[in-house]
Image (spheres, helix red, strand yellow):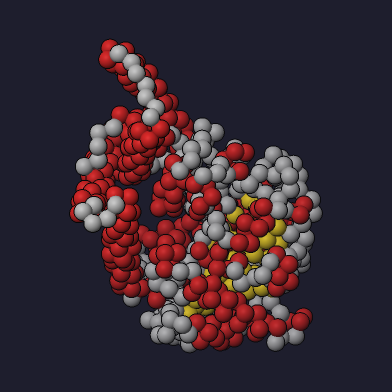
Amino acid sequence: MLPTSLLGLIVALVMYAVSVSPSLLPRSWWWHAAVSGVLMSVGYILGVVLETAGSWVMYWTGLSVHASEEAESWFRWVLVALFLLWFLRAVVMSFLASRRAAGLVEMRAETLRGYVLGVVGSLVLAYVLLGLVGALAWVGRGVVNLLVRWVPGPVAWLIAVTAVGLLVFVLTSRVLLHGAIRFFSRHAWTMNTRTARGIYQPHEPERSGSPDSLSSWESVGGQGRVFLGRGPRRSDIEAVTGRPALEPIRVYAGMPQDPHDLASRAAVVVEELRRTGAFERAVIVVSTATGSGWVDEWQVQPVEYLTGGDCATASMQYSYVPSSINFLTGLDVSVEASRQLFHAVRRALDALPEDHRPALYVSGESLGAFASQEVFEDLDDVLAEVSGALWVGTPSFTPLHRELTRARHRGSPEVAPVYDNARHVRFVNVPDDLRADVYGRELGPWGHPRVVYAQHPSDPVVWCWWDMFWNRPDWLREKAGRDVSPDMEFTRVATFIQVLADLPVAGTAPGGHGHTYHEELVPLWEGILGLHEGGRTAGLPEGSWVDEDVRTRIGQAISANIAMSDRQ
């Protein structure tokens, strides 16, 4: 076991106080226990290391502090009493602040009962983790005791630390991590063969997976079937908009038998676009799927309603595991799939007469947003190749997103940068940001092509970055996020772990917060297409527009369509 350490206990309690301070999203009691337990363990180990290092420094330098036993006892008791008073105040204030923070993202705050369960759980987890570390330390000391018979002490310690480090690496990386990846991959493969409840094979020839399609219903995978089975039909669009509509086109290709043969899948998508008459529509959207092949309905259905069905959406599957597993195993396949699909569609369009080409748009959410942006060399390439783009919840490691954010105007915050006077690119927390920045200053003219980055200040996917381990990020320093608590503070190491811990629960937030983007995507697509101006946009008829009532009905119809298939 690890040695008993007063400093270790103090640092552990400090880390606990930090862990319950407001983060981007509120936590359930069990997630509270997990995050706080890990941070308390880290704090205790850090305290032990500091105390041990201090003892070594005093030993080697000959420094010493002398006081009577009574004075030393009083000093310890006063120090502990003052610290406990600070700790109790910090925990109570953090608990109250976290409840206020929960209100900003419209989520239920942690109850007192849940908080107590979280405390107990964090103590149990910390005890278990410290026990494991103590066992590793015992192994290390055993190796040292064995080796000091033949080698000098420092060499024995170096060998012991290396041996224990390799043991930890093998157990975590080669055993636990790979085992978890294999387990979730097998589960994902099973899910990929199933059809979700409430999803049925389409019979419209305008959809892949139909009896007329080159892509069979069985070949498109579980997420492909969801994409092809959901969505509005022509009659649904007419009922909502009150105008004549076309049958919207959706094409999709499932995983190839050879995972490296992505070009063949992209070719199938292009053939499906030709078969369905997509190249005669006004708009084609190439939507990059996430790791499992999922395409967000909130990125697809708004375009179908806003264009009166005069559109086609194309996507393809390149994996069947969740995006988090793709992140661990490598992102190359997502990037390659996105490039193959986009360039295949682009080449098909370029082969058409210029005055008969549909307007080409791209979209993606999360890992799909990253992969979609990796198609292009820079912003100039984006503006040259497409009529517009909607990238939602872009991960922090996306180069184009980071480049544009770094080059933002002085005085514009990281949560909603203003780049190049917002001539083509607009970063949006809420739809009003299409017209004014977060401080209410009107933006200038918005020319075509138009690129929109939708990102919530409370979305950890957008903000979690390795640099935050030691350096305070601008978005936290500027405190400009509408749904981020002003009580959230930066603590080296701990804040990074907190935001990292927000990632698994980012999608549990209600629409408009966290990594959940819903109704706001309707006006964002409206802006990208130019419909809010009541004038002509690329490929759409003169006078295309929607009013507030229609916009509201579109949002309600999309919600109802998704909920209906989920319930069945």
x, y percent for residue 381: 71, 70
Q: Is residue 347 above or below residue 403?
A: below
Residue 115 at x, y percent in the picture? 32, 34
Q: Residue at x 53, y 84 (%)?
A: 263
Which residue shows up at 31% across the image and 66% down it? 174
Residue 461 in percent (x, y) is at: 50, 53
Q: How many marks?
A: 0
- Of 218 and 172, the residue lying toward us: 172
Residue at x 42% of width, y 30% of height: 94
Instruction: Please indicate whether residue 277 sits to the left or right of residue 353 in the image.
Output: left
Q: Quadrant of residue 124?
A: top left
Residue shown at 70%/83% (left/top)? 350
Q: Quadrant of the N terminus?
A: top left
As displayed, is residue 104 above or below residue 362?
above
* Whether residue 334 is visible: yes
The answer to whether one can see residue 547 in this image is: no
Residue nearest the observer in this picture, 59 or 513 = 59
Quadrant in which the C terminus appears:
bottom left
